[in-house]
Amino acid sequence: MMGIHVPSNVPMESTPFKGMEFEVDEIAYGFYNEYDRKAGFSIRKEYVNKCKKTGVVTSRRFVCAKEGVRGKDKRDQNVKNPCAETRCGCEARLVIVLNRDSKKYVMSEFIAEHNHYLHLPLTVHMMPSQWKVAATHAIEIDLAHESGLRLKQSYELLSKQVGGYDNLGFTKQDHKNYLHSKRQRDMEHGAVASLGRYFSHQLKENPSYYFATQLDCEELITNIFWADARMIIDYSHFGDVITFDTTYSTNRDARPLGVFLGLNHHRETIVFGGALLYDETIESFVWLFETFLEAMSEKKPITIFTNQDAAMSAAIKVVMPETYHAFCSWHMWQNAEKHLGHLLKTEPQFNADFLACIYEYDGEDEFLTAWNEMLDKYDVRENKWLIDLFKLKEKWAQAYVKRTFTAGMKTTQLSESFNADLKDCLRTDLNIVEFFTYFETIVN
C-alpha cells in the first residue's frame, strides 16, 4: 500500500467542494479535468443516469483513472507480454446530481484522497484525460490533411514544431480520431448532401464554377463533372486539342476518374475538367461529353486523344462527330506489351519496326508497305489484336493523324509529374469530399 496522497499544490479556486453548481454536466467534467491536471492524476467518466422520458442527465460520477481493479484475465495464461496493471482501487471521485428546481448540477460528493502516487507536473500532459487536440493544432491538422500529408507525416511535423512528441499534448491515435470525427461530421448527411455543400461553397467563392451530377432513381450519385473558372477560360484559348484519360483509380468506390487535359502556349499541362464516373458505358460517356461541351459553351475540340475504349469511341461519334478522334500512343504501347509480349522478348527489332509504323511514315502507301512487311517478317498476319488495330489505323498512324491539328500531342500522358501527384493522392480511404479537396490541391 502506498498510503494516502492528497493534492496540495492546487489553488483554492480550482479545488472542487460539495455544493458547487454547474450549468451542464460537461462543464463539471471540464472543471474536474482541469483540477486533476493541476493535481497530477487522470480521470474518466464512470456512469451516467438519465431520465427515461426526456433523456436529460440526472446524475453523473467522474472517478480517478485508477479506480477499481482489473477483472480476472480470461486469456491464455501463457501470454508473454500482458498489459500492465493500471488500476489499484483508488476511491477519489466527484459526483454531481441535477437539482430539479434550479436546473443546475450540484456536486453531492467529492473525495480528494488517492491511494497512489500522483504525477509530476512535467508528465501530466501524457495522462489520458489530458490528451486533446487544441484548436490551434486542429487548424494545422486540417491544413496538413487538405495538403495531402499522410497522418504519420502530419503528426511528425506537428511534434517537431513544439520540440517533440512529449510537448504535443496528444497522441497519434488522438490525431487519427480527430480526422475520423471530422470526416464523420462532413459526411453525416450522406454523400449527396456533402457534395452539394462542397459545390455550393465553390459557387459562392467563384460564380463561374461549373458542375453537373447525374442521379439514379434512388437519388444516388452516378456521374459527376466539374470545371472551375480557370479551366473554362483555358479551354477557350487552348481547347483545340485535348486528351481524356480514365486510367486513374479513385476512392473506395473504385470509380474511374476522367481528366480532360491540354497544353498551353508554353507547352505546359493544363486541366480543362474532371469527372467521376459510375461506369464506362456508352451512356455514361455520352452524358459526360455533352456536359463537358455545355460547360465550354458548346465549343468542340478539333482533335481528342483517348485510350482504345470502344464505348468512349462510340460516344465521341455521337456527341462530337466532327472532332478527329486519335488514340494515345502510350496506351497503344501498353496494349502491345499485353498482346505481343512474346515478340518483344524474342525479337528485339520488332519494337523498332512497330513504333516506326506509328510515328515515322507520312505517306499512306509508305505506311501500308511497312505494315505488311512487318506482318510477314514476324509471321503475325493472323494476330487478332493487330488485325483489329489495323482497322482503326486512321486513329493512330502518323500517315493519317498528320491530316488533323494535334499541337504536337501523341499521348494522354502529358505530364508525368501531374500523373504521379494525382495517383499518390487518390487513396482508397478518401470520402468524396476529401477526394475533391485533394484534386483541387493537385490541380493548383
Image (cartoon, grey):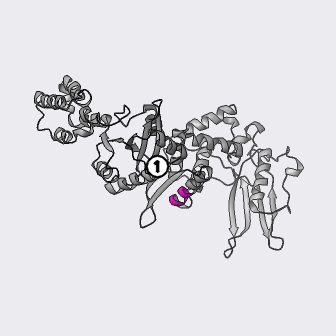
Could you say whether the residue bearing mark 1 is in a helix, strand or loop? Answer: loop
Disc tally is: 1
| Residue farthest to the top, as pictured | 349
Vertical placement of 95 versus 285: above or below?
Answer: below
Judge from the rendering whether residue 5 lies leftward or rightward of residue 326; answer left or right. Answer: right
- Give me the residue at 57% from left, 44% from top: 83
Residue at image mark 1: 296
Residue 283 is situated, as x and y percent measured from the top left of the image, at 34, 57
Q: Is residue 2 above or below residue 18?
A: above
Q: Position of residue 17 (x, y in %)?
A: 86, 57
Q: Between 161 and 101, which is closer to the camera in this rendering?
A: 161
Judge whether residue 267 can be spotted in this image.
yes
Residue at the (67%, 55%) spot, across then down: 68
| Viewer-side residue, 392 vs 19 | 392
Q: Quadrant of residue 332?
A: top left
For residue 134, side relative to residue 144 (left or right) = right
Q: Start and end of the magenta stretch? A: 191-196
The answer to which of 402 and 216 lies nearer the viewer is 402
Residue 192 lies in the magenta-colored region? yes
Residue 191 x %, y %: 51, 58
Residue at 15% x, 41% y is 384
Q: For label 1, count other residues whose C-alpha is less than 10 Å away and answer few (under 14), some (14-19) or many (20+).
A: many
Q: What secondary structure do most residues of the magenta stretch adopt?
A: helix
Residue 427 seen in render: no
Q: Quadrant of the C terminus?
A: top right
Q: Please state which amino acid type lies under the numbered disc 1.
A: Met
Most extreme residue toward the bottom, as rendered?
53
Identify which residue is drawn at 77% across, 61% down.
95
- Can residue 130 be found in the magenta stretch? no
**Quarter of the rendering containing residue 153:** top right
Point out residue 52 in the picture as x, y percentages from the top left corner: 66, 74
